Amino acid sequence: MENNKLANEPARKSKDPAYYLTPLLPEKGNIGPLKDMAQEIIAASAGLESKVARETAIVLGDELRLINSYYSNLIEGHKTTIPDINMALKNNFSQDPEKKYAQELCAAHVETEKRFMEFVNVPQKLNICSQRFLSEIHAAFYVNLSEEHLFTHTPKGFSKAPVNPGQIRDINVSVDGRSLHGPFHQDLPALLKAFAQSYAPDQFHGDERLIAMAASHHRLTWLHPFRDGNGRVVRLFSGLYLAGISVNKSNLWSLSRGLSRNKKRYMFELWATDSLDEQNDVHYFDDDLLADFCKFFFEICLDQIRFMEDLLRLDQIENRIDWYVETRAKHDKKPLRIEAAKLLRAVFMRGAIPRGMAVEILNMSERSARRIVSALIENGLLQSQSHRAPLTIGLPIGVLPYYFPDLYDPSVIGEEYIV
């Protein structure tokens, strides 16, 4: 996907575009078990979202975009930390060129995902499989990078070949430096048109839309439509496809996390599903292999949903909030009052509460309650759009190891945040 070398193979006339994309979905012998898995994913994801108040889910989902970014870029070999991504989002970058590049990539991923999630969550006729939409994702990602990073990346660093953000590749490419990867560039316009028509969400119904999402992930990876950045674009695309079919709209589980933690198999499944007919020197897709890829993809989805279900057990969240406040009350230079835990728990569970209700929840005078609310807002633990607006939960980086210790391990959160 990344680290491409240009392939100097001569262009050849391809077969009809549909040949390269069929079967669109696994067929009769394989579709049944996948439909069962798809239904399980749809139900489990909806169940997870129902356990978290809407306002809290929005805040948590935005925080998890950093996780999506971290793991998607880790797949491509670029590692940073959540604090470094946060700093990059504030235009504060490392002086080290490699660290700065990793920060740029992650921040670009977060900003692009936020921007395009707004599109898929607004009811409108929008084909997220269209060449235009894919090109806009690619362009939006690269517009956030500095000029010196707008060249294709190789194992030895940047090449002299420009990425051409948003433009379909005009060269043939090779991942291993020997064989051609994906179709000939001359065939891409027709193939991408066939892809848009074949995998548009409105072409499918019910659980088949989820199967189409999994299959399209492989097909788009194989098409390799851009000179560079294809892996990141495909993972962004799949997350947007999920949201567009009303699965994981709040971003409460991370597909990229699951794929990264199973990187070797992910890469193998992508490669194995693309078969080569050596006699005719053309690529084709085997039904059984496509079914295997979709099954693997669904296993990743279910694993990440279950992981977050365990993480978001409400009784544990309340205990973890208590743990954080107790630690701050005893050991911080600016300690929180222990009563603050009551308010934090209430806001997390309900999603939003009127400011005036803080007095009732804290069971203290209005003046004392105001002081606690002000302290929590100052610390980023609560948020409010104005002095009269409701209170919603805040998730500053310092609370993440307490609230979600299994999600943010030291390698992700940064050593300074270990608790």
Image (spheres, rainbow, N blue to C red):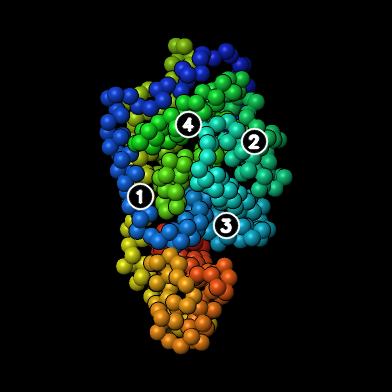
Q: Which residue is mark 2?
A: 166
Q: Which residue is mark 3?
A: 85
Please rate how many residues cluster around mark 4, counting C-alpha atoms within 10 Å: few if below 14, some from 14 to 19, many from 20: some
| Quadrant assignment for the C terminus | bottom left
> Above or below — where is 226 with respect to 15?
below
Q: CA distance from mark 2 to mark 3?
A: 24 Å
Position of residue 114 in the picture relative to residue 21 (left or right):
right
Q: CA distance from mark 3 to mark 4?
A: 33 Å
Earlier sequence position, callout 3 versus callout 1: 1
Q: CA distance from mark 1 to mark 4?
A: 22 Å
- Residue shown at 40% from the left, 22% from the top: 23
Please rate how many residues cluster around mark 3, counting C-alpha atoms within 10 Å: few if below 14, some from 14 to 19, many from 20: many
| Amino acid identity at mark 3 | Ile
Q: Which residue is mark 1?
A: 46
Q: Which residue is mark 4?
A: 200
- Residue shown at 64% from the left, 40% from the top: 139
- Residue shown at 54% from the left, 48% from the top: 118
SS under mark 1: helix
Earlier sequence position, callout 1 versus callout 4: 1
